[in-house]
Image (tube, rainbow, N blue to C red):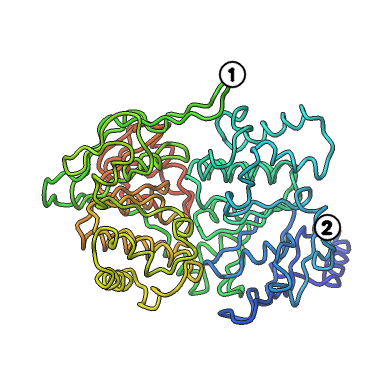
């Protein structure tokens, strides 16, 4: 795994020739002693400290670590995207096909990016231009590197969108990014990176926000590209389940330093470093939540035949795109219970969640909160009286970057008539409850990590003393260790406040751990509904079985999770 000097490579080739064997392949990427400096005033001097590893053609190397470990810094250094001079390499080499990328000019790097080195970014909405159609953005990749007729470009773009499993690519090519779900936008980014089939593909947490079936498709697609073109893949992730599916070699990083490296089999089965063992142990166990003894029969939420349809595009001579995001959805939820809404990206689960809190008007059906019908539209929030709250998938986007945390959390209670002093006292109690100190009330959102911002989102929702909490993919983008802490926090507040919860997730391991009942959604409809133990232990619908079988596992030799004797989703 460690990089070799040019002289060492030369000697190795001489030995191979003397032995009559073929010389070893030159690495596509060879990083040796790389150190990257952070600006003054940071929590440490170096973002990356003397990192070394190499990547061979057709090989996948996974860099694993928590947020802040330096793994994305390495990816940005390879791409030449570090914000110099504030963050820049101060030692080491990055050799791509024997050429040191750190010595190249910006114009030379621009010629490599997209054509020979592709990158899939973690957050697609910041990487996509919101005012350009999808097809136009992908066409820019061709325009920068090759000359193709317009019809051929469109054909290749449609083919790429089809390869990554996007529906209706002929219509989607003319859509804007904001009209797609988070998972669909990520698939667009992956299609963009693979358009010219680069020699080196850097994937920075590309499957974090994707459902398990789409994740399986993407991992399969990357493997097929490797087999066809010998592409080397540098894959950055915090999910050891993904590592077990795709990695040949693994590098584990902690606070900028490589603490363990080796083959995937060795690192997964015989981890030597305590930090590696901690990351593996933090993976959701998938242990099925046992049915809870019903304490009361108070129906907090009843959803009856809910309908919501989106219509976009279209015109006098052009067919519009119609999506039935919620098609006859019905379920009920009692006090203290948690219902999991599970499904692929685009299945409609987030739309249902937004309808439940009044952020989306619905077209038909009824939502009853404590027996009272909530009218779709502007009256919804008045009737709900703040007792229905939501925790969003992206806490940073849901917080005003110019407002301090304390006033942000206190705004809701103050609007409901609580005095400012009483509201701030409640804020301080809630910050302590979610594991933050009182000083956090005076800080801005950008001063917190992703996991801390999600805790703030939970505190803000609890400030209204809700009876129903809707959590929309609240842990999908978090590191596994932070994810475990946030899930424990959700379980604690559910018991303490006797909350009814609708927990939206694409991770069946999380659903098994958190939920009493599960509703599986596909294309806007519930295809299976029942207790968690029944749905995950004995699934009846083929789609549910597909979701379960797509879950990445550390040991791929495990039997299917719906076997009769199986009680966990993940061993």
Counting residues from the N terminus, which is met first, the one under dot 2 or under dot 1? 2
Q: Nearer the viewer, residue 340 or 548?
A: 340
- Residue 316 image point, x, y percent: 59, 18
Q: Would you say 185 lies left or right of 104 here?
A: left
With respect to residue 502, does 493 lie above or below?
A: below
- Residue 177 image point, x, y percent: 58, 41
Instruction: Say which element carries label 2.
Output: loop
For disc 2, the marked residue is 21
- Residue 410 image point, x, y percent: 32, 65
Give the foreground label among 2 and 1: 1
Which residue corresponds to the image point at 39% horizontal and 57% vertical from the top-left? 284
Q: Quadrant of the C terminus?
A: bottom left
Q: Would you say 74 lies left or right of 526 here?
A: right
Q: CB under 8 Å between callouts 2 and 1?
A: no
For disc 1, the marked residue is 316
Mark 1 Cα shell of 10 Å, populated few (<14), some (14-19), many (≥20): few
Which residue corresponds to the image point at 21% horizontal and 60% vertical from the top-left? 497
Q: Would you say 158 lies left or right of 93 here?
A: left
């Amino acid at each position: 795994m460690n990089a070799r000097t040019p002289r060492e490579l030369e000697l190795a080739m001489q030995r191979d020739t003397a032995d009559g064997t073929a010389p070893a392949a030159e690495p596509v990427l060879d990083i040796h002693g790389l150190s990257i400096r952070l600006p003054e005033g940071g929590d440490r001097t170096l973002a990356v400290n003397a990192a070394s590893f190499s990547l061979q053609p057709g090989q996948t190397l996974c860099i694993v670590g928590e947020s802040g470990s330096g793994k994305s810094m390495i990816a940005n250094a390879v791409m030449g995207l570090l914000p110099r001079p504030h963050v820049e390499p101060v030692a080491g080499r990055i050799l791509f096909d024997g050429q040191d990328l750190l010595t190249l000019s910006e114009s030379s790097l621009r010629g490599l990016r997209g054509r020979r080195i592709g990158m899939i970014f973690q957050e697609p909405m910041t990487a996509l231009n919101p005012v350009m159609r999808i097809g136009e953005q992908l066409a820019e990749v061709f325009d920068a590197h090759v000359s193709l007729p317009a019809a051929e470009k469109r054909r290749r773009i449609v083919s790429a969108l089809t390869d990554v499993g996007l529906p209706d690519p002929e219509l989607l090519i003319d859509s804007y990014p904001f009209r797609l779900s988070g998972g669909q936008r990520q698939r667009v980014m992956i299609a963009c990176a693979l358009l010219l089939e680069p020699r080196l593909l850097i994937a920075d947490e590309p499957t974090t926000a994707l459902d398990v079936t789409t994740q399986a498709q993407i991992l399969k697609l990357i493997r097929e590209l490797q087999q066809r073109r010998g592409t080397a893949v540098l894959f950055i992730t915090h999910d050891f389940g993904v590592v077990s599916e795709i990695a040949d070699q693994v590098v584990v990083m902690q606070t900028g330093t490589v603490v363990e490296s080796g083959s995937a089999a060795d690192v997964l089965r015989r981890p030597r470093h305590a930090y590696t063992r901690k990351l593996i142990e933090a993976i959701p166990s998938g242990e099925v939540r046992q049915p809870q003894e019903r304490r009361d029969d108070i129906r907090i939420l009843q959803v009856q035949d809910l309908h919501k349809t989106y219509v976009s595009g279209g015109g006098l001579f052009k067919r519009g795109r119609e999506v039935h995001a919620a098609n006859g959805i019905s379920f009920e939820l009692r006090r203290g219970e948690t219902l999991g809404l599970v499904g692929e990206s685009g299945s409609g689960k987030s739309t249902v969640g937004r309808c439940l809190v009044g952020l989306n008007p619905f077209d038909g059906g009824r939502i009853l909160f404590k027996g009272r019908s909530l009218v779709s539209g502007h009256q919804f929030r008045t009737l709900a009286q703040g007792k229905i709250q939501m925790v969003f998938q992206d806490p940073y986007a849901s917080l005003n970057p110019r407002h301090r945390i304390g006033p942000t959390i206190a705004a809701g209670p103050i609007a409901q008539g609580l005095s400012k002093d009483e509201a701030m006292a409640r804020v301080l109690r809630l910050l302590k409850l979610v594991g933050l100190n009182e000083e956090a009330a005076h800080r801005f959102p950008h001063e917190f990590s992703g996991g801390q911002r999600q805790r703030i989102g939970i505190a803000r929702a609890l400030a209204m003393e809700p009876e129903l909490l809707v959590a929309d993919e609240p842990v999908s983008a978090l590191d596994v260790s932070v994810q475990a802490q946030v899930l424990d926090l959700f379980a604690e507040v559910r018991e303490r406040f006797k909350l009814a919860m609708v927990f939206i997730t694409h991770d069946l391991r999380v659903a098994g751990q958190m939920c009493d009942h599960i509703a599986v959604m596909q294309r806007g409809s519930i295809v299976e509904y029942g207790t968690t133990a029944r749905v995950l232990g004995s699934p009846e619908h083929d789609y549910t079985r597909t979701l379960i079988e797509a879950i990445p596992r550390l040991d791929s030799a495990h039997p299917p999770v719906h076997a009769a004797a199986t009680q966990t989703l993940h061993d």
